[in-house]
Image (cartoon, rainbow, N blue to C red):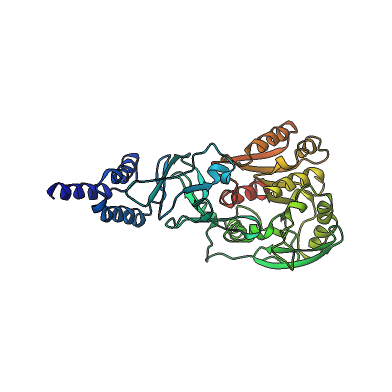
Amino acid sequence: MRILYLAILLLCACLSATAQGQGDYRKVLSTLRSFAVSDSIRLQPLVDLWWNERKSKKEVPLIAEDSVAFFYRGPASKVEWMGDFNAWGYKTDFKNKGKRVKNTDIWLLTCSFPKSARLDYKLVINGSSWILDPINPRQQWSGVGGGSPNSELRMPDWKEDPILTQRNNIQHGTITKDLVIDSKSMGYQLTYSVYLPAGTAPTSRLPVLFTTDGNEYLMPELGNMATILDNLIADGKIPPIVVVFVDHREPINRSNNRRMQELNMNEKYLAFYTKELIPLVETNFPVRRDPAHRGILGTSMGGLTSAYFSFSRPDVFGLAGIQSPAFWSRPEVYNLCDSITGPKVRVFMTSGLINDTSEGARRMKEVLQKNACTYQYRETQEGHSWGNWRNLIDDILIDLYGTP
């Protein structure tokens, strides 16, 4: 009995450590693994104590430097972790299957990531039930058309940009939502929303930016772009600009998202912008009409479209924001950008390094460099996610629109 009492004291001492370094990280895992060789009859209170300690200290996942331990507690025959780190199941060489710790209902997966990484993930229970990490409070919304939340892993050196925080002590722009345009080019109706900066005078003529996947750039859980614009303008980092958020969802049936057709280097969609949308915006809103102050911004297929629009019509779009571009879907885009004539386009392109689009983006970087384009290229230790894109929107806007 005395030996058991001393063992409990020793375990409790281990539990009191906070996982701030590799030493504490190893202590926490060592305590968990000791349960596998303990007396299972008397073990349950210690397991509960260990688990509650992780919950109270918000140590799920448990992180120290570049080491990560994922935990799950519950009855299961199989527990897997799916996310940016294994391309959501498409990358099979990443060991994503957890192991149950003997004598417990706790599952464990250990791995290593760059210290500046930020990743989305979910758990898959028994091969079919996809769930959020039950005791990880951090979430990042993602997905087409508004999406849904994923659990979020933030490594020690990753920081969220404070520009994403809404401020109450500054002026806020206004958003006119869900304007409808009956497009002859596309043969159906589309919707768009327009951001006007605070204090816009009727006689103003402001730079303008068009975004693909506009509803996602606007959503606070995704792009959160209205907040970013308000803060950048208030800080004087960019001049007041007008932003047009174009929605790919069918106006009547929002579940029908037409982005894959519209953003696939679609000539009709380019004609919709140049012949219908831009003239309408110029008639109804105080925007400049020169390409040096007109930009296009998009993610993934939208990034492909930003390149396609700006390099096909540099006389229309002089500025291009390209985030995690899906150049793989239409490799002919490289030839298009390699044979550009007319005004040079100013480009800011970004990609994550963890199962994102860096291979194609680097190839495009070489094309831009060859053509002596004015460009910036940024890589992050992240995946194909709004958590990646939203944190870079301010850098793109400052480079494309900011005062030198």
Direction from residue 52 to residue 385 in the image, left or right? right
Q: Residue at 19% of width from left, 49% of height from top?
A: 9
Residue 144: percent from the left, percent from the top? 65, 56
Q: Is residue 164 above or below residue 382?
A: below
Quadrant of residue 304 within the rendered picture: top right
Q: Residue at 69% of width from left, 58% of height from top?
A: 214
Residue 348: percent from the left, percent from the top? 66, 43
From the viewer's side, name the closer residue of 127 and 323. Answer: 127
Where's the C terminus, which quadrant? top right
From the viewer's side, name the closer residue of 29 and 248. Answer: 29
Direction from residue 88 to residue 320 in the image, left or right? right
Direction from residue 318 to residue 148 in the image, left or right? left
Residue 104: percent from the left, percent from the top? 34, 50
Q: Is residue 396 above or below residue 145?
A: above
From the viewer's side, name the closer residue of 277 and 141. Answer: 141
Figure disc tally: 0
Direction from residue 5 to residue 170 in the image, left or right? right
Residue 51: percent from the left, percent from the top? 33, 54
Q: Is residue 328 above or below residue 53?
A: above
From the viewer's side, name the closer residue of 396 and 51. Answer: 51
